[in-house]
Image (spheres, helix red, strand yellow):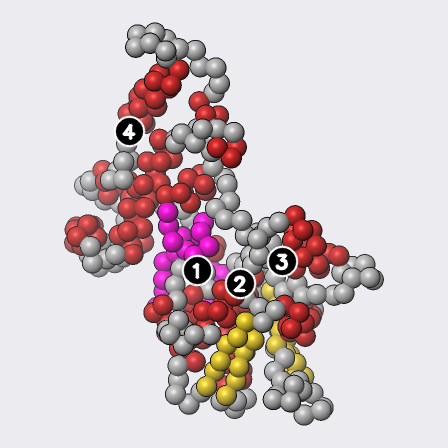
Amino acid sequence: MSCFLFPKRVLNQMTKAMRKFWWSSAKDKQGIPWIAWSTIADSKSLGGLGIRDLTDFNIALVAKQSWRILQNPSSLLSRVYKSKYFQKTSLLQAKPKSNGSHAWKSILKDPEDVEIIKTIRPSITGASDSTFWIHTKDGQYSAKSENLRKRKMVADSTCQLCGKHQETTNHLIFQCRASKEIWSMTPSIQISDGSWTSPTDNAGIGWAPFNTDGRIILEGKAAIEPVNSPLDAEAEALRMVVVQMRKLGYHIVTFYGDSSEIYDTLSNSHQASPSSIKGNHCSTYMKDIANLAKESNYNLGFQKVKRTCNGVAYKLAKEGRITNAGYVVRWKNNV
């Protein structure tokens, strides 16, 4: 089932045999289906028995084969397909051919991710593109994530509003950044940052460099074009700030932020290697930052901190988004 798509008639016959085995008490006796097969095929958490839907399972396994071809171009299967069907291009640019095998035609069935791709900014250091699967957080394809997507189930428990923390009731109502922005309309709630609302709205970024004495040097904010997620907004903000600090002549800088996905990856010089950063939407920004950090005349550090330590930057990011500000920098008088 992982080589090509089975005909629907064959899949229906296989499903029929499974149903007969399940409901029949004797070999030649017709059993009574006491409950719909679709209910039995639901996951155990939804009250079913977790029996796989063969059509969805077949599609998931073929898609996994496609993922192997993308991720392992030196494998025998990848080289055979490339030499026959897409010699001068990649699998993603390959087109169906009338004389193509059934296995090849089965592989050329992919989702449309054009709108998401359009929100990703191009690299400023010439970093290469990478391939990722949108329905998992680490960008790696699995048959499990495909089945969950087909059944419209979220593949992980990450909050869909902020994209950072586990979606518990307490987080969703009180702790999530988007929820706090709503609660901040009442006078008793402190205003917190809401730099991202949806993929169709502008995002906001903010930064506040300070010296070794702990005094803020300047405050910067800006509105940027829509991005796909809060993680993308933070990654692009960090890339922009790295570039701006270089333009201002600072060669030794430590950057702080609360995104573990970004700062934990960049905090280690080995992990910050551009070739090791892949598998998510913001990999382009991360590769640019890693390339800039590797230059010999700069000493850039990255450290994750708690959200409460980044309040000034959050406030500036929210102001930048709400006011749709251009690139605004305000130097502080106490420097």
Where residue 231 is drawn, which disc sits there?
2
C-alpha gap between disc 1 and disc 4: 34 Å
Mark 1 touching mark 4, by CB under 8 A?
no
User: Magenta segment range?
Assistant: 118-142
**Residue 130 lies within the magenta run:** yes
| Dot in front, 3 or 1 | 1
In the picture, the quarter occupied by the C terminus is: bottom right
| Dot in front, 2 or 4 | 2
Q: Secondary structure at mark 1?
A: loop
Which residue type carries mark 1?
Asn
C-alpha gap between disc 2 and disc 3: 12 Å
Question: Furthest-top residue in view?
Answer: 29
Question: Mark 3 = which residue?
Answer: 197
* 153 up-or-down from 207: above or below: above
In the picture, the quarter occupied by the N terminus is: top left
Comparing 178 with 108, the one in front is: 178
* 194 up-or-down from 107: above or below: below
In the rendered image, which quarter is residue 3 located in? top left
Where residue 7 is drawn, which disc sits there?
4
C-alpha gap between disc 3 and disc 1: 19 Å
Mark 1 touching mark 2, by CB under 8 A?
yes
Q: Residue at x 42, y 90 (%)?
A: 297
User: Residue 314: horizontal and vertical position, in percent?
Assistant: 65, 70
**Residue 49 lies within the magenta run:** no
Q: Residue at x 37, y 43 (%)?
A: 143
Which residue type carries mark 3?
Thr
Mark closest to the chain's N terminus, 2 or 4 = 4
Q: Secondary structure at mark 3?
A: loop
Instruction: Classify 10 Å Cα crowding around label 2: few (below 14), some (14-19), many (20 and above).
Output: many
Where residue 280 is drawn, which disc sits there?
1
